[in-house]
Amino acid sequence: MQIPRFFCLLALTVSFISVDAQNSVATSREPEKKKVYFAPHAKVKKVRKPNVKHTQRYEYYERVEKAAREKQRILKKLSKAQFSDPRYFGHKRIPKRKPFFKMRYCNECGIRH
């Protein structure tokens, strides 16, 4: 009976050793790092953005900018005296005040002056 015990003991130790070896290999394994080789005079490729001017977004911003410029132009025109001073009232130049007996009805503004 000595021999079968020996073989059982031997089989158990071999199986434990193989399981420990597999676990140690699995735990000690780290992700392999890739080796990167750099060429000394490698050419760098330049990435150029396409010069596309006919996209919907581009055309939208063009319309918005054009409307803003037009509004600025109108505001500049309206800030002139002809439009901001009430004495002009539809005239390009201020109408002269005449004596009451020389006053006439104005076709532009509908007032006598």
Image (cartoon, grey):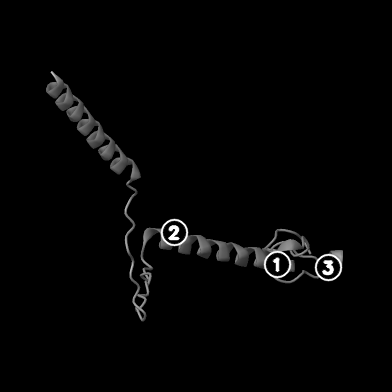
Residue under label 1, please give it. Answer: 91
Mark 3 → mark 2, Cα distance in angstroms: 51 Å
Q: Nearer the viewer, mark 1 or mark 2?
A: 2
Q: Nearer the viewer, mark 1 or mark 3?
A: 1
Q: Position of residue 65 (x, y in %)?
A: 52, 63
Seen from the viewer's position, the closer of residues 1 and 24 is 1
For image coordinates 42% across by 63% down, the residue present is 58
Residue under label 3, please give it. Answer: 97
Mark 1 → mark 3, Cα distance in angstroms: 13 Å
Dot 1 amino acid type: His
Dot 3 amino acid type: Arg
Looking at the image, residue 97 sits to the left or right of residue 23; the answer is right
Above or below 23: residue 31: below
Query: Which disc number belongs to residue 60?
Result: 2
Q: Nearer the viewer, mark 3 or mark 2?
A: 2
Task: Give the quadrant of residue 102.
Answer: bottom right
Q: Residue furthest bottom?
A: 41
